[in-house]
Amino acid sequence: MNDGCGMGPAVALFRSLADDTRLRILTRLAVGEARVVDLTGELGLAQSTVSKHLACLRDCGLVDYRVQGRQSFYALTRPELMDLLAAAEGVLAATGSAVALCPTYGLDTPAVSR
């Protein structure tokens, strides 16, 4: 890892992943492509919420869509993203509750504006 210079893209990637809704969408898309209506039904979210988060994930290059007739099917652009999330699960398992109890980013910390 470097000394902090040039970390902007990594920071942006992890910020894009730092939202429960976006992680849920990515995890669902890892199974296969889906339409907004599929995601709203399966995840129990409003259409506007799903669309907003898909736009963010598209802007970050993590998902894209294909049009078929009048429907858009969203899919992961980088399947290796799931390897990154699996590695994160390994880190979380190894650190126990330290991350959850972190005074800055822990579970009881008020949400930061996104």
Image (cartoon, rainbow, N blue to C red):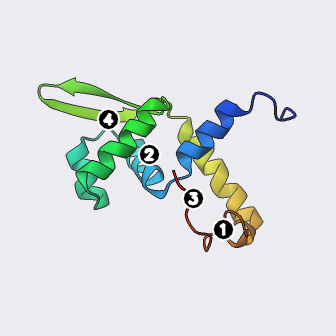
Task: State the residue lying farthest toward the right.
Answer: 3
Q: Are marks 2 and 1 in contact (CB under 8 Å)?
A: no
Residue 29 numbered mark, or none: none
- Read off the residue under disc 1: 106
Residue 112 numbered mark, or none: 3
**Which of pointers 1 and 4 lies earlier in the amino acid sequence?**
4
Q: Nearer the viewer, residue 41 or 7?
A: 7
Q: CA distance from mark 4 to mark 3?
A: 27 Å
Percent coordinates x, y for residue 42 in the rendering: 27, 57
- Amino acid type, mark 4: Tyr
- Read off the residue under disc 4: 74
Quarter occupied by residue 102: bottom right
- Is 101 drawn above or below residue 94 in the view shown? below
Percent coordinates x, y for residue 30 in the rendering: 42, 43
Give the crowd class for mark 1: few <14, some 14-19, many >=20 residues within 10 Å: some
- Amino acid type, mark 1: Gly
- Is 60 drawn above or below residue 44 in the view shown? above
Q: CA distance from mark 1 to mark 3?
A: 11 Å
Q: CA distance from mark 3 to mark 2?
A: 21 Å
Give the crowd class for mark 4: few <14, some 14-19, many >=20 residues within 10 Å: many
Q: Are marks 1 and 3 in contact (CB under 8 Å)?
A: no
Q: CA distance from mark 1 to mark 4?
A: 31 Å
Q: Secondary structure at mark 2?
A: helix
**Which of pointers 2 and 1 lies earlier in the amino acid sequence?**
2
Q: CA distance from mark 4 to mark 2?
A: 10 Å
**Which of pointers 1 and 3 lies earlier in the amino acid sequence?**
1
Quarter occupied by residue 36: top left
Q: Secondary structure at mark 3?
A: loop
**Which of pointers 4 and 3 lies earlier in the amino acid sequence?**
4
